Image: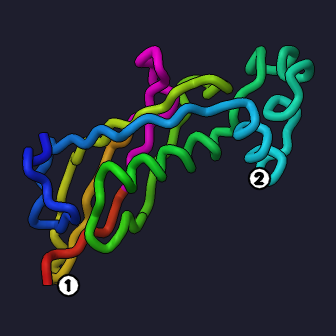
């Protein structure tokens, strides 16, 4: 677990393998699903309930990229790295569709920390962030490499 008295901003030296960070929640409604899809992923199963019923999703589903964007927001708020959550690569998988009405929460766990040999002011932190719906079902798994800096 993260230290009980976590600082406002986390540096590489504050992190340890096994630390976990649990986010606040975000409720996704029909309007959010349609707005995101209209702008970024305009496919019928994200926009039209009738068309979505006959799709692989068997009902309206949020774009996976929308779920990823919500995950990012929740991750940034729950694991406040001092210089930001700077990605250096990731693997992303969607276990099930996110639906209008779902309430999402992210649990992030530090899997690895590798200090840089060539740049001693930083390191790479491997973080597994699992996004759950209100039923405790996994909707997305993100394993990312994040650049984290030491205190200056």
Local packing at callout 1 (Cα closer than 10 Å; few below 14, some 14-19, many 20+) is: few
- Give the residues in magenta: 130-144
Left-right relation of 26 to 1 = right
Quick one: label 1 or label 2, which is nearer the N terminus? 2
Image coloring type? rainbow
Residue drawn at (11%, 61%), measured in percent from left and top?
A: 14
Residue 86, position in %: x, y? 39, 68
Instruction: Name above or below for residue 45 compared with residue 19.
Output: above
Q: Quadrant of residue 149?
A: bottom left
Residue drawn at (10%, 66%), measured in percent from left and top?
A: 13
Residue 31, position in %: x, y? 75, 36
**What type of secondary structure mainly makes up the magenta span?**
strand
Residue drawn at (44%, 27%), measured in percent from left and top?
A: 132
- In the picture, the disc for residue 31 is none
Q: Camera-side residue: 104 or 96?
A: 104
Residue 20 is inside the magenta segment: no
Residue picked out by circle 2: 40
Element on which disc 2 rests: helix
Left-right relation of 100 to 5 = right
Residue picked out by circle 1: 118
Task: Name the mark nearer the viewer: 1 or 2.
Answer: 2
Residue 94, position in %: x, y? 55, 33
Q: Camera-side residue: 115 or 103?
A: 103
The image shows a total of numbered marks equal to 2
Residue drawn at (79%, 39%), measured in percent from left and top?
A: 34
Q: Quadrant of the C terminus?
A: bottom left
Q: Camera-side residue: 109 or 119?
A: 109
Residue 51, position in %: x, y? 91, 22
């Amino acid at each position: 677990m993260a230290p009980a008295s976590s600082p406002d901003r986390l540096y590489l030296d504050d992190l340890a393998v096994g630390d976990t960070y649990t986010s606040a929640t975000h409720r996704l409604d029909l309007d959010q699903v349609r707005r995101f899809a209209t702008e970024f992923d305009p496919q019928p199963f994200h926009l039209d309930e009738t068309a979505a019923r006959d799709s692989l999703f068997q009902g309206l589903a949020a774009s996976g990229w929308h779920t990823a964007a919500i995950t990012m927001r929740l991750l940034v708020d729950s694991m406040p790295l001092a210089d930001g959550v700077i990605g250096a690569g990731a693997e992303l998988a969607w276990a099930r569709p996110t639906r209008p009405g779902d309430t999402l929460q992210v649990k992030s766990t530090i899997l690895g920390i590798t200090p840089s040999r060539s740049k001693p002011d930083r390191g790479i932190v491997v973080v597994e962030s699992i996004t759950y719906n209100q039923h405790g079902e996994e909707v997305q798994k993100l394993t990312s490499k994040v650049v984290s800096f030491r205190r200056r």
